Amino acid sequence: MKTDMERKWWKEAVVYQIYPRSFMDSDGDGVGDLKGIISKLDYLKELGIDVVWLSPVYQSPNDDNGYDISDYQAIMEEFGTMEDFDRMLAGMHERGIKLVMDLVVNHTSDEHPWFVESRKSRDNPYRDYYFWREGKDGREPNNWASCFSGSAWKYDRETDMYYLHLFSPKQPDLNWDNPKVRRDVFSMMNWWCEKGIDGFRMDVISMISKEEGLPDGKVFPGARYGWPNVVNGPHVHEYLQEMNREVLSHYDLMTVGECSGVTIEEAKKYARADGRELSMVFQFEHVGLDDGKYGKWTDRRVDLRDFKKVMSKWQTELSGKAWNSLFLGNHDQPRSLSRFGSDAPEYRVMCAKMLATCLHMMQGTPYVYQGEELGMTNCPFDSLDEVRDIESLNAFKEMTETGTITPEDMLRYINLRGRDNARTPMQWDGSENAGFTKGTPWIKLNPNYKEINAAAELADQDSVFSYYKKLIALRTQETVIVYGDYQLLEPESGSLYVYTRALKEEKLLVICSFTNQEECYELPEEFRSGSILIGNGKREKVEEKICLLPYEALVIKK
């Protein structure tokens, strides 16, 4: 650590993401809510996390599960009231837990008052809050594809023009080039900060500055539409620095940008050490490693060598220049255990602990997605009727109707990679509906909840939950875990992930086995007289040559 000035609370924190719809239902309507979250605050305190990132709870028609906001300063009726929110925030603060809100300002809902006004006439004062364009040769203004399939343009008969939506047609993109848009967004952010929240996770924030003139995008082989030129646009850093001046710098906040398409060089700008933009970014290179010919719709597995290469690149190249976010899963990804490890019953517990060790020992702020601390797994969806996610449903329609992928294969890919895997209800206990609701859950429950649930794990000293507690507590005790330099060992191994962390005289060796076979490793000499800091096996002493059990993880302190 170069100077004490570099220490920040958000670097030393562990974040827990709550997807409120699926966390805990207090009123029996089958949908999680704020009172449900309040009832589980002691559980979060027990786990030891420092920060909650709350997925959107604002008023929304729910076309994209709350990421289509119709009122930024009201609470979705299904989730409760602003009084419930205030009670939840106070309850978190009483327990020493900070709250980071999800900020969705690349787009609004088409039911937001700004858009309702905007579509009324071509000369409406709010017209320029969004991207409205004339059609071209009887078609869309350009060839851009929506991230949710089809064109990124929707024709509106009212004014005989098209509006831009990079996601659902019910999510029109805001025009950040309009200073009035920025002023209104910053005013709303200040309102939440004055309420006492502790930061923002910024949804697709790297998309807020579109390329001038909105030129056609590159069309990949077999694609109908072109990929839009919208990430890391010409003014994105200028707008974020303005946001920092007008809002962020006035409070002690943690800010993380969801930056799809971010490169190392861009990340150094977004999360710059001088604090002029954001605290950190989410990069997605490691969760794209198993993409195939049709993007995420594939059964490919991540090659450990590729995974190590990507993770190590971000660890070393951001060191001292910007701060990493560490995650394997979130509400947009399948369950990390099923994807990066093994969810087979005989390996699940060891593997969940190993993945947690591998991630939490790196430099950066770790994120725990709800249920990850229990070792929750992907859910078997038996038919399309059980699927709720707009992205999966649209992709199924597009891929099967064009004959690109068979319906059987597409359902299999949704089971492996679909976003609903992370959105099945939190598994609280072995009672009906896993203790999540007294009603009918809004989405299918994973049938393994009787074996995998919080009640059983809280009572078991050897559970995944208990292991997460120890891992999280270690960050407060060992400064080297937070601030130490990272170095990869054994880059060519296809089964072991081995790295060191070093800070002044302190040094750790992290060994993680990503295989269901026994794997032996000869320790570097300097660690042979070390002690075991944490591990997921029964190992008690350090040996010169260690033969690791399937999915064993071990951290040795020099």
Image (cartoon, rainbow, N blue to C red):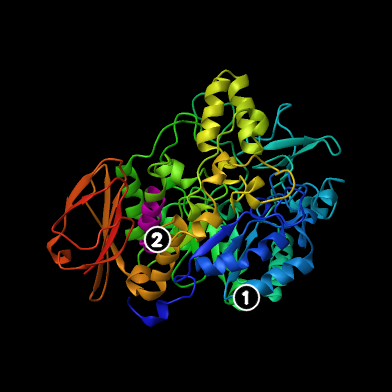
Q: Can the viewer see residue 361? A: yes
Q: Position of residue 100 (x, y in %)?
A: 60, 66
Q: Which residues are magenta?
A: 351-363
Residue 152 sits in quarter: top right
Is 354 a magenta residue? yes
Residue drawn at x 36%, y 53% is 354
**455 and 404: which is toward the camera:** 455
Q: Residue furthest top?
A: 403
For disc 1, the marked residue is 93
Q: Position of residue 485 (x, y in %)?
A: 30, 66
Instruction: Classify the position of the N terminus by image quarter.
Output: bottom left
| Amino acid type, residue under disc 1 in the picture | His
Q: Would residue 509 be found to the left or right of residue 325 on screen?
A: left
| Amino acid type, residue under disc 2 in the picture | His
Q: What is the magenta segment's predominant secondary structure?
A: helix
Residue 154 sits in quarter: top right
Residue drawn at x 58%, y 25% is 399
Residue 393 sits in quarter: top right
Q: Position of residue 78 (x, y in %)?
A: 78, 53
Q: Classify 167 as above or below 436.
A: above
Q: Would residue 100 be found to the left or right of residue 272 on screen?
A: right
The circle drawn on residue 360 is 2
